[in-house]
Image (cartoon, rainbow, N blue to C red):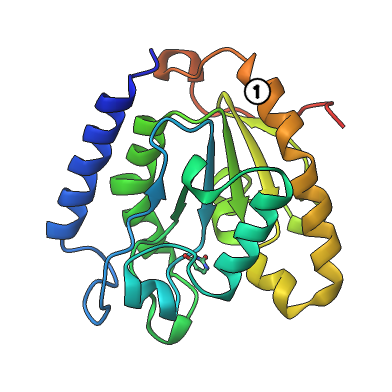
Amino acid sequence: MKGNKKEKAIKLRELREKAKNANLPLKEGSANLVFGEGNATTDVLFIGEGPGFHENDQGRPFVGAAGRFLEELLESIGMTREQVFITNVVKCRPPGNRDPRPEEIDTCTSNYLDRQIQAINPKVIVTLGRYSMGLYLPNAKISDVHGQALRVKGRLVVPMYHPAAALHQGSLKPVVERDFSKLPELIAQAADAPEYTEQSSGGPEEPKQLNLF
Ligand code: URA
């Protein structure tokens, strides 16, 4: 059952406190835990990779150049970051912005990200970049699946290029913009999809592409 706003906010607050006090991978040497932020009752959850320099400094996700581009993309579809929830696979900055390691991803996912998803219960999960995509589509190539709506374990997952990738490689910018432009319709269609519950997930499932576009 979809919990109410207060219950979801309480659950997320409890999780954040737990994360603050836990011996999380990468915590040592990072300035701040970046748990994630946004609307606890949103239908859309964005999952990035991990905090960078500015996120580590401020304790908030996507507040640097990639974050500004993400905000522009949200604005282009009439949304603000306050309407969605934004988080990352790993909750602390990998030193020197190195890639997160499998054991760091596993620990942060099983203890925090999975529980955040359970608490928020979003209709649509947008993965930003290959690390969050890999949680749902471990064998996919982002160039093959970006912008497609895929049903994985009862949820609608939309893999997208990471905004930072589009900033580094200009040719990806219109691709990301086009993928983003599909989101409102996907969200609207997902709103009619049956609610995800642990019972309805039925265990591991092959991703199914939805024929929405
Ligand atoms: N890149 C990410 O993946 N996450 C952030 O929070 C910022 C940049």
Furthest residue in direction left, as rendered: 21
Give the percent coordinates (x, y) of residue 196.
49, 19
Q: Quadrant of the N terminus?
A: top left
**Is label 1's Cβ within 8 Å of ligand 1?**
no
As drawn, is 52 to the left or to the right of 149? left
- Does residue 30 show up? yes
Total tally of numbered discs in the picture = 1
- Image vertical order of residue 212 relative to residue 100, above or below: above
- Image vertical order of residue 127 relative to residue 25, above or below: above
Furthest residue in direction bottom, as rendered: 96
Q: Residue at x 83, y 51 (%)?
A: 178
Q: Residue at x 62, y 19 (%)?
A: 191
- Given residues 115 and 179, the one toward you in this image is 179
As drawn, is 56 to the left or to the right of 67? left
Residue on which the image places disc 1: 190
Question: Within the image, what quadrant is residue 92 found in?
Answer: bottom left
- Given residues 201 and 206, the one toward you in this image is 201
Give the percent coordinates (x, y) of residue 143.
80, 58
- Does residue 208 show up? no
- Image vertical order of residue 178 relative to residue 78, above or below: below
Q: Residues within 10 Å of mark 1 (few under 14, many from 20)?
A: some
**Element marked by disc 1:** helix
Question: Within the image, what quadrant is residue 210 found in?
Answer: top right
Give the percent coordinates (x, y) of residue 132.
55, 54
Q: Quadrant of the C terminus?
A: top right
Give the percent coordinates (x, y) of residue 98.
47, 81
Q: Residue at x 57, y 23 (%)?
A: 154
Q: Residue at x 26, y 26 (%)?
A: 6
Callout 1, which amino acid?
Ala
- Given residues 17 and 135, the one toward you in this image is 17
